[in-house]
Amino acid sequence: QVQLVESGGGVVQAGGSLRLSCAASGGTIREHAMGWFRQAPGKEREFVGGISWGAYRTNYADSVKGRFTISRDNYKNTVHLQMNSLKPEDTAVYYCAGIRVGDSSVVVTWEYMYGTWGQGTQVTVSS
């Protein structure tokens, strides 16, 4: 059973950047579609972006397109979320998630499909 641990969260001023990391242990993410989600106080958890395990296809929420970039290294068992031009509305707990899929080109955007989740890392963007 793959376990996921996020890191890299913190406090940053608006316009700044952060790079979140998701490290997997107990197995490989090599056949897992991976995703990033976030949950702001008082709001439901929402999809941020996802990446397939082969061909590294990506999909992003409209709110982060052009500012956030997901990458992965299957050999290092890690996934990253580079966040640029951060806004106060990006403040949330960010979660990494994974799901084993047979199709290497699939990007999974639906929260309910993910079976493995990290504990989350707090990102706070000050204005």
Image: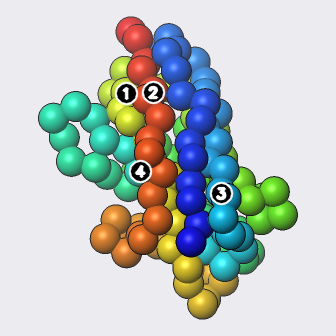
Q: Quadrant of residue 4?
A: bottom right
Which residue is denoted by mark 4 in the rendering? 37
The residue that label 1 is drawn on is 91
Q: Residues within 10 Å of mark 1 (few under 14, many from 20)?
A: many
Dot 3 or dot 2: first in sequence order is: 3
Q: Which is more foreground, mark 3 or mark 4?
A: 3
Q: Which comes before the other along the chain, label 2 or label 4?
A: 4
Secondary structure found at label 1: loop
95 to 67, vertically: above or below: below
Up/down of 102 relative to 97, above or below: below
- Residue tagged 2: 123
Residue in the picture at 52% in, 15% down = 12
Alpha-carbon span between mark 2 and mark 4: 12 Å
Mark 2 Cα shell of 10 Å, populated few (<14), some (14-19), many (≥20): many
Q: Which is nearer the N-term, disc 3 or disc 1?
A: 3
Question: Which x, y percent locates residue 113?
Answer: 37, 75
Cα–Cα gap, marks 3 and 4: 16 Å
Per the image, the residue denoted by label 3 is: 24
Decide: marks 2, 1 in contact (CB < 8 A)? yes
How packed mark 3 is, by other alpha carbons closer than 10 Å (few <14, some 14-19, many 20 or more), is many
Residue 87 x, y percent position in the rendering: 42, 24
On-image quarter of the N terminus: bottom right
Marks 3/2: CA–CA distance: 20 Å
Q: Could you tell which of marks 3 and 4 lies nearer the N-terminus?
A: 3
Q: Is residue 36 visible?
A: no
12 in relation to 38, above or below: above
CB-based contact (under 8 Å), mark 3 and mark 2: no
Give the SS element for disc 2: strand
